Amino acid sequence: MALSPLFKPVEFGQIPGWKADPKAEAFAAFSRCAARIHVKPYRTGTLGVAVEAFSAAYAEARAIGSIDDDEARAFFERHFVPALVTPAGNSGFVTGFYEPVVEASPHRTERFKAPLLARPTDLVDIDDANRPAGMDPYLAFGRRTADGVSEYCDRRQIETGSIDTAGLALAWLADPVDAFFIHVQGAARLRMTDGRLVRVTYAAKSGHRFTGAGKVLAELGEIPLEQVTMQSIRAWFRAHPDRINEILWRNRSYIFFREAPVEDAALGPVAAAKVPLTPGRSIAVDRLLHTFGTPFFIDAPTLTAFDAKPFRRLMIAQDTGSAITGPARGDLFAGSGDAAGEIAGVVRNDADFYALLPRALVEGRL
């Protein structure tokens, strides 16, 4: 597979903020991918960044363990060539995501009525091998029935009783808006009323297309598009509790969860690349286009929510999302808890994406 012409090689010295960014945490995140690759290789994205080209960098990362910032910068400069990602007619764009931490109950009560559901037994994966004729090719999940596989129920149908959810609830939340944002983020830490700390993370989804609540509210004229943030959406729901379902049911996508351990409180959940996310260093990308494990230097000078300075950081591609589409589109992982949510909720910024491409690939040695 040829390398995409969307990649325009540059020198490291041409990247704004490259030398100033400390890179030890980015190296640690990259090393987690290096360890994971032995279990199951990542899929090469359609832009042609072959997973095999990372072999030398992964091998060295596994061998050397932890290193300091200067050594990390030398490592990335030794193994990679930076390339500006040039999407046709568009600038790059970043948003933010985080892991909510909320109170939850293991049982439904008068206060806790909004469930987080486990994957139903009748939900099946769909691909070209088993997709029924005429089914929307976007759908990656379906419903097993006596007559074959059909489209799965959407959010409104699930929440109004179209499937038997008995026994599927992993936990119950007090606020349906909290539950919805956990669906959007794909994971959460739950402080259970019985004293346990439980993490839930993505297991599957209904398969339908995602429609953001912010987009709906902007289209209805309720919030100006330029003012749409997680905070403004939550404020609107607090002011209009009678319209929550009206808005949320516009998003047909529904997420199912599984329990997962909290092995390291400093790291986020295990995401699509099968490694735990690193706050401020993991980025979700379009997995059809890009290859997990690829380092990206993000230059977003108008983004200051992370540390009150222009955002110029080396990130590692370790997750994806339904709304993350395009070669220069990313979702920055801000961490866990309310403080991380305050950061993630306001990230909507133009950005330049510099992909770090393995030297073997760029220099034709692969």
Image (cartoon, rainbow, N blue to C red):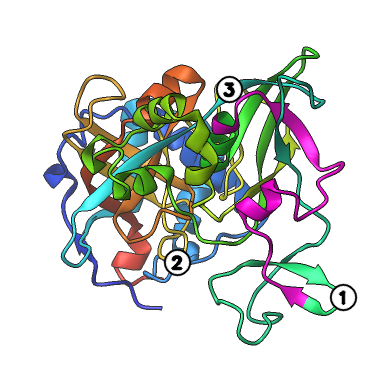
Cα–Cα gap, marks 1 and 3: 40 Å
Q: Secondary structure at mark 3?
A: strand
Label 2 sits on residue: 45
Cα–Cα gap, marks 1 and 2: 36 Å
Q: Residues within 10 Å of mark 3 (few under 14, many from 20)?
A: many
Label 1 sits on residue: 146
Q: Position of residue 138 (x, y in %)?
A: 53, 71
Looking at the image, tell me whether mark 3 or mark 2 is earlier in sequence order: 2
Label 3 sits on residue: 101
Using residue 344 as the reference point, say whether residue 146 is left or right of it: right
Q: Answer with the quarter of the image where residue 229 lies.
A: top left
Q: For the residue marked with disc 1, what is the amino acid?
A: Ala
Q: For the residue marked with disc 2, what is the amino acid?
A: Gly
Q: Residues within 10 Å of mark 1 (few under 14, many from 20)?
A: few
Q: Secondary structure at mark 2?
A: loop
**Residue beneath the point at 61% across and 40% down:** 270
Residue 317 image label = none
